[in-house]
């Protein structure tokens, strides 16, 4: 018996040494982090119920300063929120391989821009960059304005009582991205296929959230055995059939309307569509690139799906929290409204892209809201080579490096009283004093958000239109929020705002 116990103890010690004293573990364990348990490292600390995941991150960010790590053989991860360290990781393509959590998106986005790497990413980024050229954004602004007007109608019908803005804003951003990315209207068309596509996208979003918050579902093998895994498979088929059909229809339309062989750049793209008086879609550039054999049909599908995913939930989260913040900060809301009224006077004409460039205070409100409530609150990389950070810690190759945008944006030393909503933090003189990687809602460096200008245009346009028409009154307060662990920042429950119709813009 004694021999049996002794040999078991020795075996456990050997396992412990093997798990926790290999080269990776030794390097990682020099970085501050939670206390290591025998054999299992930090496993027990990180397995928490899904609704506690965000709190766990915030708790660690408070306990450690700018960096902490987890280790549980064979998985290791370091979370950083020092601007100097973030610059080391984000400013080069050396560390551009995406972390393990992005693997959850693979069945849907495949090798689209968000997940691809190397030459493929470079080619795709080159094809897609002109989509966000000023001239094309100007055309998108017309579509965004039409969708904003539909949103105003919805808000008007529900005014004078608290509305959960989450579903209303999601509907707006999903319709907007669908029309700008694919040239397809979800609202007016309201065919069975369009409705089912919309519902499917929402449901897939929920499945991602559920999977993200349960680490045991990260394994494809286990996930595919669950009812969620089976449902996701079915839903992805619906999405793919819909986008395939839209792409085919668009190809047919382009072939009939455009004699030009290919579209070489944004100016030409703009020219062709302006002459034909056609609404442009991001998809058109991809179809054009297919003629040059730069991309194939499967590639077009990947990119359309990527834009649909990246382009709606993120902006919906940004708009939701910005509306809530403006409702809760009456003085700031009034200042933003005064700026709009000064610009437009009594006129009730629609706000244009040119107007948008003349609303610097609203711009600062959006920036501040994206600081406190960054829609993409963390990003993650898998390091393929060793990295020395600014504070001399070494992160070994093979481990994950999470960049906590949320904790970076809430650092007391960079943003005193970080929970206070203060748009003037973004006055040029204050920005100039800050590290360039201290504010990164759209990431930074070569793999930054390609849709940043589009997102800001969409947010600004719709906020300006909403503020002109409604006074936003507080219902949900900042202290009521409780975030759930998800790829996009989300409150656990509804986010209520009361929209009260203004009598007249001129009298405010
Ligand atoms: C407020 C809204 C948005 C925020 C906060 C946001 C944020 C981000 C962030 C942080 C990344 C980097 C992700 C990473 O490195 O893992 C990213 C990448 C990306 N975003 Fe956005 N995004 C927004 C809206 C949009 C929109 C509207 C589109 C499309 C129209 C878009 C398309 C993309 C794409 C395709 C990438 C991958 C870029 C690449 O790797 O080259 N995003 N976004």
Image: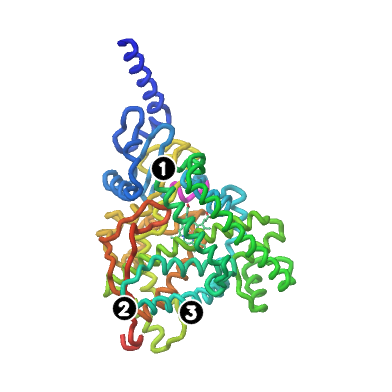
Examine the structure image and report whether residue 441 is included in the region drawn in magenta.
no
The alpha-carbon separation of the residues under discs 1 and 2 comes to: 42 Å
- Residue 362 is situated, as x and y percent measured from the top left of the image, at 37, 73
Residue 18 in view in this figure: yes
- Residue 423 in sight: no
Q: Is mark 1 within 8 Å of ligand 1?
A: no
State the SS at label 1.
helix
Q: Is residue 17 left or right of residue 192?
A: left
Magenta region: which residues?
Answer: 88-93
56 and 383: which is toward the camera: 56
Q: Work out whether 297 lies above or below 222.
A: below
Picture quarter with the C terminus: bottom left
Q: Label 2's element?
A: loop
Q: Return the residue nearer the eye: 426 or 204.
A: 204
- Is tag 1's residue or tag 2's residue first in the polypeptide sequence? 2
Mark 2, residue position? 160
Disc 1 and disc 2 in contact, CB within 8 angstroms: no
Q: Main secondary structure of the magenta part?
A: helix
The image quarter containing residue 293 is bottom right
Q: Residue at x 58, y 69 (%)?
A: 184
- The residue at which mark 3 appears reads as 352
User: Label for residue 65?
Assistant: none
Q: CA distance from mark 3 to mark 2?
A: 28 Å
Coordinates of residue 431 in the picture (x, y in percent): 36, 63
Q: Residue 73, image x and y in percent?
A: 41, 32
State whether residue 228 is above or below residue 13: below
Residue ID at (32%, 79%): 500
Residue 215's tag is 1
Q: Nearer the viewer, residue 222 or 76?
A: 222
**Horizontal arrangement in the rendering, residue 289 relative to residue 428 (left or right):** right
Quarter of the image that includes the N terminus: top left
User: Height in image: 159 above or below 250?
Assistant: below
């Amino acid at each position: 018996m004694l021999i049996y116990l002794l040999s078991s103890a020795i075996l456990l010690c050997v396992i412990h040494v093997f798990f926790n004293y290999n080269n990776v573990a030794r390097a990682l364990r020099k970085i501050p982090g939670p206390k290591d348990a025998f054999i299992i490292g930090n496993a027990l600390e990180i397995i928490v119920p899904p609704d506690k995941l965000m709190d766990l991150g915030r708790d660690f960010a408070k306990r450690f300063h700018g960096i902490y790590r987890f280790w549980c053989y064979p998985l290791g991860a370091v979370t950083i929120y020092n601007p100097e360290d973030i610059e080391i990781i984000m400013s080069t393509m050396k560390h551009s391989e995406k972390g393990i959590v992005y693997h959850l998106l693979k069945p849907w986005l495949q090798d689209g821009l968000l997940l691809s790497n190397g030459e493929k990413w470079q080619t795709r980024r080159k094809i897609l960059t002109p989509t966000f050229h000023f001239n094309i954004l100007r055309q998108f602004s017309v579509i965004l304005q039409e969708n904003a007007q539909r949103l105003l109608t919805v808000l008007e019908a529900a005014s004078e009582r608290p509305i959960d803005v989450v579903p209303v804003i999601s509907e707006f951003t999903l319709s907007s991205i669908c029309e700008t990315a694919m040239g397809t209207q979800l609202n007016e068309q309201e065919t069975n296929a369009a409705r089912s596509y919309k519902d499917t996208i929402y449901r897939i979003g929920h499945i991602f959230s559920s999977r993200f918050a349960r680490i045991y579902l990260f394994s494809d093998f286990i996930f595919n055995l669950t009812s969620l895994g089976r449902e996701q498979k079915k839903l992805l088929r619906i999405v793919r059939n819909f986008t395939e059909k839209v792409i085919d229809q668009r190809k047919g339309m382009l072939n009939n309307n455009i004699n030009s062989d290919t579209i070489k750049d944004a100016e030409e793209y703009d020219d062709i569509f302006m002459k034909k008086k056609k609404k442009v879609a991001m998809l058109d550039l991809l179809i054009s690139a297919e003629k040059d054999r730069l991309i194939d049909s499967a590639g077009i599908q990947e990119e359309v799906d990527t834009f649909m995913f990246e382009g709606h939930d993120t902006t919906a989260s940004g708009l939701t929290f910005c509306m809530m913040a403006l409702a809760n900060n009456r003085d700031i809301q009034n200042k933003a409204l005064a700026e709009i009224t000064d610009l437009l006077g009594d006129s009730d004409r629609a706000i244009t892209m040119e107007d948008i460039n003349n609303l610097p205070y609203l711009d600062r409100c959006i920036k501040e809201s994206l600081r406190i409530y960054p829609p993409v609150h963390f990003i993650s990389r898998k390091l393929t080579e060793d990295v020395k950070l600014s504070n001399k810690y070494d992160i070994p190759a093979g481990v994950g490096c999470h960049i906590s945008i949320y904790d970076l944006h809430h650092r007391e030393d960079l943003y005193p009283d970080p929970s206070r909503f203060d748009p003037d933090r973004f006055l040029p003189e204050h920005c100039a004093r800050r590290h360039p990687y201290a504010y990164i809602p759209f990431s930074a460096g070569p793999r930054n958000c390609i849709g940043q200008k589009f997102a800001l245009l969409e947010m600004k346009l719709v906020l300006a239109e909403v503020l002109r028409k409604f006074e936003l009154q507080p219902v949900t307060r900042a202290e009521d929020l409780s975030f759930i662990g998800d790829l996009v920042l989300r409150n656990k429950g509804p986010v209520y705002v009361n929209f009260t119709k203004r009598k007249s813009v001129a009298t405010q």
